[in-house]
Amino acid sequence: MKLIGFDTSGESTDETRLDGKVFGLTKRYDKKRAAGAQAGHQGRLSGVYRNVIEINGGSLVAAGGYATTLGLICGLLGLYFFRDSFFGDLAKGHYALTAIGILCLFCVFFIGIYFEMFSPSESPIYFDRARRKVYYVHRSGRRRFILFGPSMVEARVIDWSLVDAEHHTKARASTASVSRDHYLVFLMRKSETDPTIVDAYPIGPIDVPSALWEYIRRYMERDAAPLIAGEAPPYKGATFDMIEALKQRKQNYWQDWKELPFTQLWQHLALPLFAVFFVVNRFVVWTAQKVHWPQEVKDALGAAITEEDLMVDSMHKLRPEREAVKDGI
């Protein structure tokens, strides 16, 4: 998959991807060397299994549609405020100019449709240290219906030995400043003898990519525990759905007015905007492509680890003991 804003073409070798040769590449990591003293999932850990960790999990579409909604509302407002200009151009026979102007007003709307409609329902990446495998979601860059149709989405399995990791940056500019976003990018090689990059998977923006990579590296290479002392395993419950959230709000409606009156007032004033967002969100959910994981992945995952499982983990391979307990304090 060709990632937008990242150079993931060519071969994944230390010689071809030196710092300075690849645009946006900051550092290339080594599985056998520590990336730094700091290691942590930085809130990206979404599931812990007996021999697998899940990074970047969760639904991508349950609350999606912000860009499309923003583009639609801004486009309609622009059309309203510039209606006299458009009608004047139409009266003069400037049909092409009018069409271009309308397309410019709705450009963010079309960009939102491109990225948010027909997207994968989820896009986690799993690291299986028992089988030395990595499971992830591949999304083809080619659309079935040219621009706005669904692309091919499939779950893929690759050997851990064929996965390389890099730290990439992207520039982000505003009217007041210029900053950089940091990403951890995984490159998938074709085979042990052919280093051609056949796929890539980015995680970010994140604060410290080296810390996330070191967390994953220690888990896969040094059998480190996926959780730190006192950390609860990520909750793997039902996927968030906006309709169910609205039902819950209905149950607590009057209680919320008592406890959060100003928040409730603002939400009611913004209700017309939310109505538009709700309609767009339904289209995002309905057009989402469900990811079908192979049976071997389902078998490898098993059930997610719970607090009860940690209590019977006498070897503390999933979560180390608290220092206070070790010292008898």
Image (cartoon, rainbow, N blue to C red):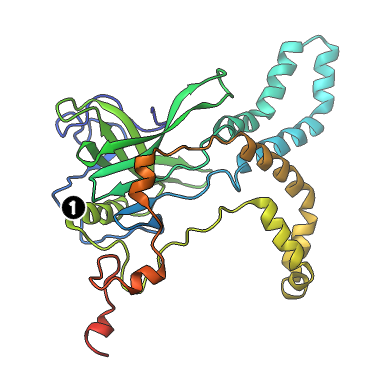
Task: From the viewer's side, name the closer residue of 104 and 71.
Answer: 71
In the figure, residue 277 lies in which quadrant?
top right
Residue at position x 27%, y 60% from top? 39
Residue at point 68%, 55% (across, down): 244
Name the foreground residue: 33 vs 96: 33
Quadrant of the image for the N terminus?
A: top left
Mark 1: few, some, or many residues within 10 Å (few <14, many ≥20)?
Answer: few
Residue 117: image quadrant is top right
Report whether residue 182 is seen.
no
Viewer-side residue, 270 vs 154 = 154
Q: How many marks?
A: 1
Q: Quadrant of residue 190?
A: top left
Residue drawn at 59 percent across, 47 percent down: 62
Q: Amino acid at mark 1?
A: Glu
Q: Quadrant of the C terminus?
A: bottom left
Q: Is residue 239 left or right of residue 246?
A: left
* 105 sits left or right of 204 in the view: right
Residue 249 percent coordinates (x, y): 72, 62
* Horizontal side, residue 200 vs residue 243: left or right: left
Position in image of residue 226 (x %, y %): 30, 61
**Which residue does the numbered mark 1 point to in the structure image?**
221
